[in-house]
Image: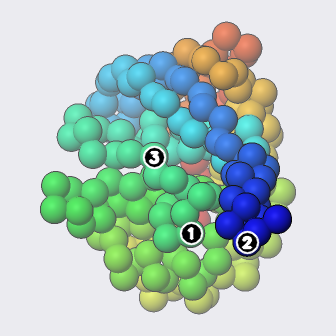
Amino acid sequence: MDSVTVGTLFTNTTHAMALRATIYKAELNVADNDRAYYGSHALTVARHPSETDERLMVRLVAYALYVSDDGLLTFTRGLSEADEPALWRRDLTGAVKQWIEVGLPDERRLLKACGRADEVIVFAYGRSADIWWAGVRHKLARARNLKVYMLPVEGTLALAALVERSMVLNANVQDAIVWVSGEKGEASLEVVPLN
């Protein structure tokens, strides 16, 4: 076999072995009484092969909490792209107005994001969220444009149980509590500010 054939075989095999994102469709109806925002959104969300149902649904909740009529809030390539958050709001010039992370990001990543965006928001969740926060809070104290929220484990696990490839979700927000209902049930999450 010549080198061209070997290279072609390797490239084709690598392509065939690459894991692809799974596409989810969501009709998200938002009634946010805290912000007086009400709207319906037809969303297509790509789920990275290593992403859990819980993380996917936390991204949708983050969207519900920050969507507005400006239409600038978008899902990014997320886990596929190290230099992008889960969601962001960029203005027409490309400047990042809001950088929204979900999970337990490294403090260096957050400090770098604070230098790139007007506002950085983190939705921390999972069983080790308290430990994560205890380890990074002092390192992040100087970041004045950072807001960190914690979502309770029971709530995010209940949220994960609502996942379907095609789903209709209703998100009602009042007094920092998000109530999400869908075909498979409902979940309630208190959005707890940490800083």
Cα distance between the residues tagged 1 and 3: 14 Å
- Residue 4 in the image, given as x and y percentages of width and height: 68, 66
Q: Residue at x 35, y 67 (%)?
A: 119
Q: Nearer the viewer, residue 94 or 148?
A: 94
* Residue position marked by numbered label 2 in the rendering: 3
Q: Quadrant of residue 61?
A: top right
Label 3 Cα crowd, 10 Å radius (few <14 / some 14-19 / many 20+) = many
Q: Is residue 16 above or below residue 35?
A: below
- Residue 149 in the image, given as x and y percentages of width and height: 57, 58
- Marks 1 and 2, the one that precedes in the sequence: 2
Amino acid type at mark 1 = Ala
> Disc 1 vs disc 2: which is toward the camera?
2
- Marks 2 and 3, the one that precedes in the sequence: 2
Q: For the residue labelled by badge 1, is the local secondary structure a helix, a strand or a loop?
A: loop
Q: Is residue 36 above or below residue 131?
A: above
Is 85 left, or right, of 114 in this rendering?
A: right
Is 132 left, or right, of 113 in this rendering?
A: right
Q: Residue at x 50, y 45 (%)?
A: 62
Q: Is residue 94 above or below residue 13?
A: below
* Residue position marked by numbered label 1 in the rendering: 82
- Marks 1 and 3, the one that precedes in the sequence: 3
Discs 1, 2 touching: Cβ within 8 Å: no
- Residue 173 in the image, given as x and y percentages of width and height: 47, 31
Q: Quadrant of residue 159?
A: top right
Cα distance between the residues tagged 1 and 2: 33 Å
* Residue position marked by numbered label 3 in the rendering: 75
Q: For the residue labelled by badge 3, is the local secondary structure a helix, a strand or a loop?
A: strand
Q: For the residue labelled by badge 2, is the local secondary structure a helix, a strand or a loop?
A: helix
Amino acid type at mark 3 = Phe
